[in-house]
Image: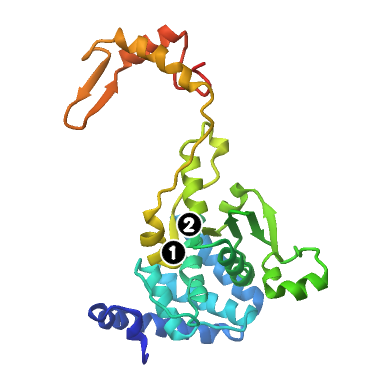
């Protein structure tokens, strides 16, 4: 446990580490039990926990040590990188909604697999949010091996497209190109192009902060449910949290569409409004400096425009 306090604020580290110690011990105990288990037995154990989580709507706290141990075992068998105790504690911190500060090389990408798997078991979806397309693809292709071993699906959403982790999918490129580009080329291997809806439907989705934000805005301005790509926001892990929630958050995300002939409507609406009465067709909130049209006002506008519903797509012409 030496050196663990540097991951947490000094006034919180002692109590958190005391609470984490028995959980880490329990994980280590289950890990010892799993060491001699077959691949099928490991997957079956997680499937059993997953079935309970789906039925109850969330993974049980009592299953936490087993889930962490199963993820560690999957990582040992696929990446040859079992989680150290300090990484278990980092994963527990994220699971508890805390910020875990880790230096480059200390394995934060691997740490994220622990809480991501735990919350993904409910079937409600998990988003791992990162700062750029490269990291989203890299981490999904890298950690996808662990998730795939456990029977979980992995999606990727970037500005360049959406993908799903598929170990049978390999980009058809010449070896000479790979030699020139180096290891960066492999981050398209095992990532099969899919729709955004399919990528977000995966158990775990790696996504850039900008794409997550823009897709949220687009979903909330969609005219039809079939146009919505995100399935909800159950749990998210944010990489580079200071950058995403502070630095990047200073720049607003703005979406826009073609104006069409809407500028021609101003005079028509101005004429309709002149015939409306305050208190009957609209109300004025002086404090909020806002005007709210009433049902009677909406009906009057629809009658003047010859429409059945002013809010339908393309209703106003």
Q: Is residue 58 visible?
A: no
Q: Which of 180/56 is in front?
A: 180
Q: Quadrant of residue 35?
A: bottom right
Q: Which of 219/66 is in front?
A: 219
Residue lying furthest left: 287
Instruction: Using residue 175 as the reference point, say whether residue 98 is left or right of it.
Output: left
Q: Is label 2 in contact with label 1 (beta carbons under 8 Å)? A: yes
Q: Secondary structure at mark 2?
A: helix
Q: Quadrant of residue 266?
A: top left
| Residue at image location 63% in from the left, 54% down from the top | 160
Quadrant location of the N terminus in the rendered image: bottom left
Q: Is residue 222 above or below residue 52?
A: above
| Residue at image location 52% in from the left, 24% down from the top | 313
Q: Residue 154, percent across and down?
A: 60, 61
Gap between marks 2 and 1 measured at Cα: 9 Å
Q: Residue 148, percent across and down?
A: 63, 67
Q: Which residue is mark 1?
A: 238
Q: Which residue is mark 2?
A: 209
| Residue at image location 38% in from the left, 66% down from the top | 242
Q: How many other residues sit within 10 Å of disc 1, few (<14), some (14-19) or many (≥20)?
A: many
Instruction: Using residue 257 as the reference point, say whether residue 290 is left or right of it.
Output: left
Q: Is residue 13 above or below residue 258?
A: below
| Among numbered discs 2 and 1, the one appearing first in the sequence | 2
Q: Quadrant of residue 3?
A: bottom left
Q: Secondary structure at mark 1?
A: strand
Q: Is residue 226 above or below residue 7?
A: above
| Residue at image location 65% in from the left, 76% down from the top | 39
């Amino acid at each position: 446990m030496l050196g663990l306090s540097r991951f947490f604020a000094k006034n919180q580290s002692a109590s958190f580490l005391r609470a984490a110690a028995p959980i880490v011990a329990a994980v280590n105990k289950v890990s010892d039990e799993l060491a001699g288990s077959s691949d099928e037995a490991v997957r079956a154990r997680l499937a059993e926990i997953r079935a309970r989580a789906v039925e109850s709507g969330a993974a049980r706290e009592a299953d936490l040590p087993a889930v962490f141990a199963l993820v560690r075992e999957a990582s040992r068998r696929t990446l040859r990188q079992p989680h150290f105790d300090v990484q278990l504690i980092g994963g527990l911190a994220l699971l508890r909604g805390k910020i875990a500060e880790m230096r480059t090389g200390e394995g934060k990408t691997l740490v994220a697999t622990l809480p991501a798997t735990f919350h993904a078991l409910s079937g409600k979806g998990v988003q791992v949010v990162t700062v750029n397309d490269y990291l989203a693809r890299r981490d999904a292709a890298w950690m996808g091996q662990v998730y795939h071993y456990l029977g979980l699906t992995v999606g990727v959403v970037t500005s360049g497209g959406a993908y799903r982790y598929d170990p049978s999918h390999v980009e058809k490129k010449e070896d000479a190109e790979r030699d020139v580009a180096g290891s960066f080329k492999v981050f398209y291997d095992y990532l099969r192009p899919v729709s955004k809806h399919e990528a977000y439907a995966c158990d775990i989705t790696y996504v850039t902060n900008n794409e997550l934000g823009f897709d949220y805005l687009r979903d909330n301005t969609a005219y039809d449910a079939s146009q919505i790509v995100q399935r909800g926001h159950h749990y998210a892990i944010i990489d580079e949290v200071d950058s995403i929630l502070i630095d990047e958050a200073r720049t607003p995300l703005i979406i826009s569409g073609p104006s069409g002939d809407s500028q021609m409507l101003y005079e028509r609406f101005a004429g309709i409004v002149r015939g409306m009465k305050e208190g009957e067709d609209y109300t004025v909130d002086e404090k909020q400096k806002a005007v709210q049209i009433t049902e009677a006002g909406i009906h009057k506008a629809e009658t003047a425009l010859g429409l059945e519903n002013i809010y339908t797509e393309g209703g106003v012409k």
